[in-house]
Image (cartoon, rainbow, N blue to C red):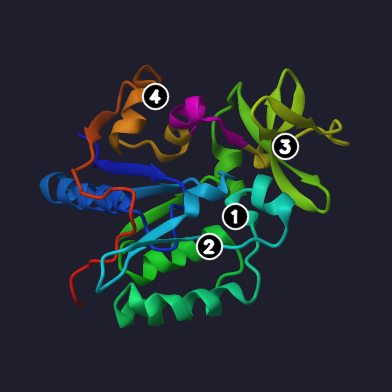
Amino acid sequence: MSTPIICFGQQPCGFFPRRFLAAKFITARRLQRELGGEIVFFFHDSDHDPRETQTTLRHRKTGEPLTLNFTFANKVQRKWSPLFAKRIPPDWQAGTARQLPAYVEPRWVEAFKQVAATNVADFCLEMYRAMGLLDGVRVVRSGDPVVRSAACEVGEYFADVPHAGDTVRARCVGGALKLHEGGDCFVTLPPPATPLAKAQLSPTRDSRLRWMQSVVCCTHYIAGAGEQAYLNKADAPEISFVNRDHIDRSDEAYTDLPPA
């Protein structure tokens, strides 16, 4: 019997992770205690939606919620750059740190201040690491050119291409590269000057499981209710799918780790 590989996937989802992501870590560690094997976090840092990194915290005294997010270098980056390419303005970290003492324990304020990252995806990942969530976990990033080059071919994909001085994530639709403006509006980009390389491509949601599995080769995959609804399990019949453990206030930030 092969050694279990317990995997779960998620976009960067807040500089303090949302509680549903924490629940996936908790579920994975429980399964590892039961089965042994390795835990793999498929970090989908190719996504470009700036709403993914919204971080909702509760005031430590009043319980009132506050939603924070990164600021971005410019409009193009905010709307269309992949999360690994969204640059963080120099003053964002210090300004956000001044707001945190009312919402999180001092150790997390200090951990936040110590993160040295210039883009959104790296900042989230390093904060998760500082919180101990990544201890003993292998991270596979969808934006890694080595991972992309090793993955299987997919018919539907996004491509990272230059636009207006930045890197953007454009959807390939009918052979054309398009940026979603909102609603039914799209910006069609000029054809690339050279053929697209695999290292530029990342999968759409519907093809992500097969693409990921071609690299990770997991035996167990932990998914939330939303994922379970759209995953095409026929793409990976060798995987045992596991529902993530329940957690309350799942869309808020997770900061209630036990003391070290």
**Residue 260 relative to residue 141: left or right:** left
Mark 3 against mark 4, which lies toward the viewer? 4
Q: Which residue is mark 1?
A: 84
Quarter of the image with the N terminus is top left
Q: Earlier in the sequence, mark 2 or mark 4?
A: 2
Count of marks, rendered view: 4
Amino acid type of the residue that numbered disc 4 sits on in the rendered structure: Tyr
In the image, is residue 148 above or below residue 174?
below
Mark 3 against mark 2, which lies toward the viewer? 2
**Residue 118 relative to residue 211: left or right:** right
Do the CB atoms of the residues marked 1 and 2 lie less than 8 Å apart? yes
Within 10 Å of the Cα at label 1, are there few (<14), some (14-19), or many (20+) other Cα atoms?
Answer: many
Q: Which residue is mark 2?
A: 122
Instruction: Report the residue at 55% width, 30% height from top.
Output: 204
Q: Earlier in the sequence, mark 1 or mark 2?
A: 1
Gap in angstroms between the C-alphas marked 1 and 3: 18 Å
Residue 149 drawn at (x, y percent): 61, 40
Residue 197 - label? 3
Instruction: Report the residue at 61% width, 24% height from top.
Output: 156
